[in-house]
Image: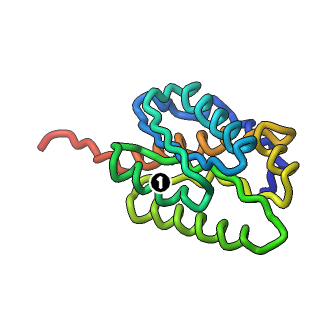
């Protein structure tokens, strides 16, 4: 669904499990800090609102570096999920297509290979105003959406990996 049809910050809080026992990593790109920092703030506030107390943060120069930093966090911290936050604004060249393709594939592969949910909190707008609109502007904050997604994915993983309890022997 296009974010112009849905506010990224709106969700049913009653359906979100507690994140109290969950451990998160957040990787945030420094490129377009006027966009990525509000996304990060929305993400952290949402995680904390739902009880998260363990949040490891890493900053990287740009969106392309999100995947490798996420891998470093997974390999060096005991985490339940990693949230990648970045912004690639379409420009005069096709660089955005290469970056977005590489990052989305990298995040997907890292998640599949490690079994740790790695969340795509990357904006891919056509212009700066579209990014502002999705970083706390008129369409909400994608950082909030990424945090909610991380909590839900950790809960799903925990639910599916719980061993069945048997009575008796």
- Where is the C terminus found, in terms of image quarters? top left
Q: Height in image: 91 above or below 45? A: below
Left or right, 30 with reference to 91: left
Q: Nearer the viewer, residue 164 or 136?
A: 136
Q: Position of residue 118 (x, y in %)?
A: 50, 54
Q: Height in image: 113 above or below 83? A: below
Identify which residue is drawn at 81% across, 56% down.
2
Disc 1 secondary structure class: helix
Q: Position of residue 90 (x, y in %)?
A: 80, 64
Place residue 16 in its image quadrant: top right
Identify which residue is drawn at 52% across, 66% down.
106
Q: Position of residue 100 (x, y in %)?
A: 66, 66
Left or right, 162 with reference to 32: left
Count the labels in the image: 1
Q: Nearer the viewer, residue 156 or 74?
A: 74
Q: Which residue is mark 1?
A: 69
Left or right, 91 with reference to 75: right
Q: Nearer the viewer, residue 122 or 14?
A: 122
Q: Height in image: 159 above or below 115? A: above
Q: Position of residue 101 (x, y in %)?
A: 64, 70
């Amino acid at each position: 669904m296009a974010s112009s049809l849905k506010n990224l910050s709106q969700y049913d809080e009653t359906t979100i499990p507690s994140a109290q026992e969950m451990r998160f990593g957040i990787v945030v790109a420094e490129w377009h800090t006027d966009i990525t920092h509000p996304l990060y703030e929305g993400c952290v506030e949402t995680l904390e609102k739902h009880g998260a107390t363990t949040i490891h943060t890493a900053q990287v120069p740009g969106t392309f570096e999100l995947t490798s930093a996420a891998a470093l966090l997974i390999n060096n911290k005991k985490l339940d999920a990693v949230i990648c936050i970045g912004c690639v604004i379409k420009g005069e060249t096709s660089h955005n297509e290469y970056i977005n393709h590489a990052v989305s594939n990298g995040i997907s592969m890292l998640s599949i290979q490690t079994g740790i949910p790695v969340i795509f909190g990357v904006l891919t707008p056509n212009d700066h105003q579209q990014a502002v609109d999705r970083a706390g502007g008129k369409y909400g904050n994608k950082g909030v959406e990424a945090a909610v997604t991380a909590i839900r994915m950790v809960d799903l993983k925990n639910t599916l990996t719980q061993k069945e309890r048997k009575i008796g022997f």
